[in-house]
Amino acid sequence: MSLDPDRFAKLLCGYCLAVQPDEYVLVRSSVAADALLLAMQREILERDAWPMLRVELPGQTAAFYAHARERHLDNAPKDAVDEVKRMDALVSIQAPTEALELDGVDPKLIGRMALARKGIRERTMDKRWCSTLWPTPAAAQRAGMAPEDFEAFVERALFLDQDDPVASWRGLSAFQAGLIERIGGASELRIEAEGTDLVLGVKNRRWVNSDGKRNMPSGEVFTGPHETSAEGHIRFGIPSVPGGRMVRGIQMEFRGGEVVSARAEEGDEHLQAALATDDGARRLGEVGIGTNFGIDRPVGAILFDEKIGGTVHLAIGRSYPETGGKNTSAVHWDLICDLREGGRITADGIVIQQDGKFVV
């Protein structure tokens, strides 16, 4: 394996989370990420902090939904609440053991549990956190790549193929800071592409420079559009695999900021269930512009796909409070629109990106 777990762990514990002595660091993943989990334990201990490993077995989540009773779906366990209170930082490592592990689970059950654990997620968002991915055969299968090719793809996306990954992330951060200078004062964004013409209000909303601290890899700038501003229609041509469920060919229409019609060519039942989760699920919590041109193709992992240079993504549901967004929901689902062939983003009528390339 060319992807060095020790180097990866140093990036996560250092650049991403800046782990300090005596802190409690919760690390979540599956057994398929054993090499990285052990490297994380070593690195956290060497920083004189406390590792808390939470490791999931193959099939564990699907089996939970198959056997859970009403109270398991509609309540949060006490130990999960206590754990979030105790921890100082969290690393969530996607390491699927099946390509589409939850495809057969009733989406209504997933929505119920999301509502029950909304409070835990809100507490978690107040801590230092980072989401990442460890390449597994199942993730490679989902991406349609050979395992060794997918591993090399992940290594490049993380900048771990470079002599100084941290310097590279800081370089991308500087580029994104310049992009925010250009669009930060805009009142209105317009997104145009095949099947897409959507206007969003962003006046006085704060743009965030996502440079690898919370997502690794990263490469986006994002904000929270005004909750009643979205007008028009959009087609999300890049498939989405939230929680191991395939949803493809999504089209949405917005009026007054609300989704008034939506359908998916595949996985429509998952889309409709997500939109029905709560009132906030039918409004937008985020608009983000991908800037990572090292990620040049979708791989079925939103963490990567939303960062593709030349794409824009919209999240239905929860806003990030640091943007000034006010939408609340148990849902936050990023959906990706590819602008690399005939697409355009304008800010107050000024072209920012054309055909997936930033306009200087």
Image (spheres, helix red, strand yellow):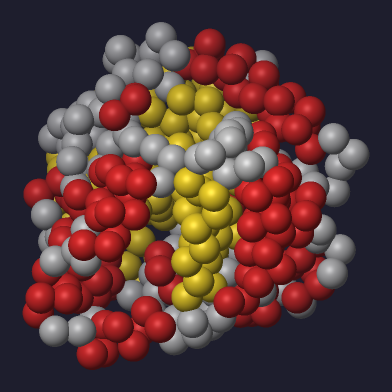
Give the number of callouts.
Answer: 0
Foreground pick, 144 / 96: 96
Foreground pick, 80 / 309: 80
- Give the percent coordinates (x, y) of residue 291: 62, 35
**Measuring 50% from the left and 58% from the top, which residue is drawn there?**
52
Residue 251 in view of the camera: no
**Measuring 28% from the left and 54% from the top, which residue is drawn there?**
82
**Measuring 63% from the left and 48% from the top, which residue is drawn there?**
44
Quarter holding residue 60 = bottom left
344 left or right of 319 in image? right
The quarter of the rendered structure image containing the C terminus is top right
**Measuring 44% from the left and 31% from the top, which residue is drawn there?**
222
Q: Is residue 323 above or below residue 246?
A: above
Q: Is residue 116 above or below residue 19?
A: below
54 left or right of 123 in image? right
- Give the percent coordinates (x, y) of residue 46: 71, 46
The quarter of the rendered structure image containing the N terminus is bottom right
Q: Is residue 213 above or below residue 341?
A: above
Residue 122 in view of the camera: yes
